[in-house]
């Protein structure tokens, strides 16, 4: 979408994506190799009673699902920031995540482009919110 087509209050919903135990372990081995993400036996003895996804994986998955809606399309220039990032609840193996996206601000810039800020709210299959963040991007007109 072009910058001029965004309006505060617009809402979008993504498809769902299931994170398997293997997905969680493989991501964590590369990007967040802490025991609660990669060591199933030790994780079972920990606070959450099982492996959990890295918050970075939850955030990346949320962004992926948003981008795959195609709303940004070819008009996105670059991300400009993320704010108010909250890892609300753990994500467990076989949780299915979906994202509700709401446009919360549009700020015009020169040449007709501008910054669009959306709030990403990620839910699991039980409709429990697990993640939330504000994401801003420069969008062409």
Image (spheres, rainbow, N blue to C red):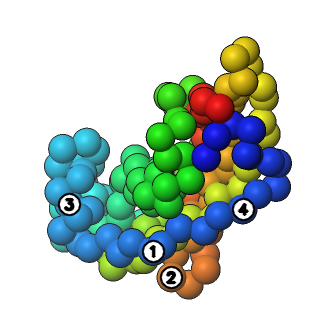
Label pair 2/1, CB-CB below 8 angstroms: yes
Judged by depth in the image, the label closer to the viewer, 3 or 1, is 1
CA separation in Å, label 4 and label 2 = 19 Å
Could you tell me if residue 29 is visible in this image? yes
Could you tell me which secondary element the residue under label 1 belongs to? loop
Could you tell me which secondary element the residue under label 4 belongs to? strand
Could you tell me which secondary element the residue under label 2 belongs to? loop
Label pair 3/1, CB-CB below 8 angstroms: no
Residue identifier under label 4? 11
Label pair 1/4, CB-CB below 8 angstroms: no
Residue identifier under label 1? 16
Label pair 3/4, CB-CB below 8 angstroms: no
In the image shown, does 29 or 78 lie closer to the viewer? 78
Could you tell me if residue 45 is visible in this image? no
Sequence-wise, the earlier of marks 3 and 4 is 4
Q: Quadrant of residue 39?
A: bottom left
CA separation in Å, label 1 and label 4 = 16 Å
Compared with 63, 19 (above or below) is below
Compared with 131, 109 (above or below) is above
Residue identifier under label 2? 125
Label pair 3/2, CB-CB below 8 angstroms: no
State the image coordinates of residue 17 (x, y, percent, origin top left).
39, 72
Q: Quadrant of residue 114?
A: top right
Judged by depth in the image, the label closer to the viewer, 3 or 2, is 2
Could you tell me which secondary element the residue under label 3 belongs to? helix
Q: Give the quadrant of the C terminus.
A: top right
State the image coordinates of residue 55 (x, y, percent, origin top left).
43, 51
Compared with 63, 109 (above or below) is above
Residue identifier under label 3? 25
Q: Residue furthest bottom?
A: 126
């Amino acid at each position: 979408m072009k910058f001029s087509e965004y309006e505060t209050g617009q809402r979008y919903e993504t498809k769902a994506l299931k994170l398997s135990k293997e997905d969680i372990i493989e991501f964590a081995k590369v990007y967040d190799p802490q025991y609660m993400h990669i060591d199933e036996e030790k994780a079972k003895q920990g606070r959450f009673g099982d492996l959990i996804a890295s918050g970075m994986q939850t955030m990346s998955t949320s962004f992926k699902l948003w981008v795959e809606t195609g709303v940004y399309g070819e008009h996105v220039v670059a991300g400009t920031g993320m704010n108010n990032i909250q890892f609300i609840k753990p994500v467990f193996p076989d949780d299915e995540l979906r994202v509700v996206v709401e446009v919360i601000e549009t700020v015009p810039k020169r040449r007709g482009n501008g910054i669009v800020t959306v709030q990403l709210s990620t839910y699991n299959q039980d409709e429990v919110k697990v993640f939330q963040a504000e994401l801003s991007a420069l969008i062409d007109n």
